[in-house]
Amino acid sequence: MPANLPPDYKVVEKRFREAKTTEDKIAALQEMLAIMPNHKGTDKIRADLRRRLSKLKAEQEQGQKKGHRGGPSYHVPKEEAPQVILIGPPNTGKSSIVAATTNATPEVGNYPFTTRTPLPAMMAYEDVHIQLVDAPPLSPDHMDTWLPELIRNADVALLVVDLSADDCVDMLLFVRETLATKGIRLSAVHNPTETELPRNVKPTLVVANKLDSPNANENLEFLREVIGDEFEILPICAVMGKGLPELKKRLYEFLDVVRIYSKIPGKQVDLNQPFMVPRGGTVIDVARKIHREFGDHLKSARVWGSGKFDGQTVDRDHVVEDGDILEIHVDL
């Protein structure tokens, strides 16, 4: 039986053959497996790709234990909060944004490559938290091999540019094109009907920092002219705090999540720590957020908010809405 591999597979296969690092090879193999049709004609190819992937992962793990010459790999585990990664060229003020919006104290310096490893920190917005990850910069001279995978793992990217630099437009285009060569497409939105692997399409906002610089308005106007509707641009000045409240609000909206408050049967609702699920999420998604075993043992649920009446009993597929109060009943 013929394999009938789609054109997208051939593109990724070419990227795999050209990959120079173990991380890039692993990412390409994983994407090839995701794209490949699942039928008898692809069984042998799929098995071969899995063998290669297993071998590369073993080599990667062994290399990390021995201090692999390609450098360390970094992974920032996701907390319960959505994860947002700050990317961009050197010296754009990513660390200043993290310092101004969280309780973290990253090293901030007016020189390139101040950030050498990813730094996670929690940003509060109203009654929720969003995990920000300050990533090392991308430049024409250097990019850490593990950075693309770090970007893939995040929910949203903030592409930070420096309005004091006359080449800010060129640097934005450089970041976009460099990540495209790694199979990552920065997008203003993610269309669920697209055939691309969701991890490779990263919803992105452009943050134009250093709005206080003398030539900032001129560079901002040029940036908007070139970028057009491709990305939404949020002008800020992290050092002076200008635009940060608007950035927090827009980032929360852009994540497209809803807040759900839990209620223990017979007790008052907990309004201090809401659970967040993607818009369109269901009761079963919230149950798993509360505790992973709750999803397997969900007996019933009552909802205040999106039901026809307060305290209505709903099934596991009931779509929750922002601000709902959910009372989960499990059979353990």
Image (cartoon, rainbow, N blue to C red):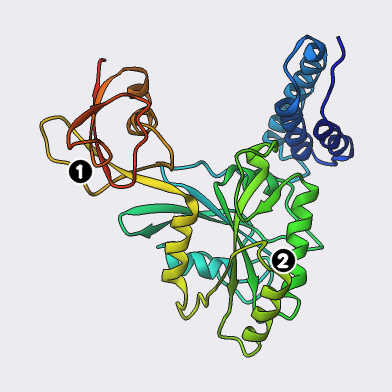
**Dot 1, crowdedness within 10 Å: few (<14), some or many (≥20)?**
few
Query: Mark 2: few, some, or many residues within 10 Å (few <14, many ≥20)?
Result: many
| Residue under numbered circle 2 | 172
Disc 1 marks which amino acid?
A: Asp
In this rendering, does residue 105 appear at all? no
| First in sequence: mark 1 vs mark 2 | 2
Look at the picture and state if 69 lies above or below 143. above
Q: Position of residue 163 (x, y in %)?
A: 64, 78
The residue under label 1 is 270
Dividing the picture into quarters, in which one does residue 169 lie?
A: bottom right
Residue 156 in the image, given as x and y percentages of width and height: 56, 51
Residue located at (33% from left, 47% from top): 322
Q: Position of residue 110 (x, y in %)?
A: 63, 77
Judged left or right of residue 205, residue 29 is: right
Image point (70%, 36%), residue name: 195
**Residue nearest the viewer, comparing 44 with 38:** 38
Task: Identify the residue at the far front of this view.
Answer: 308
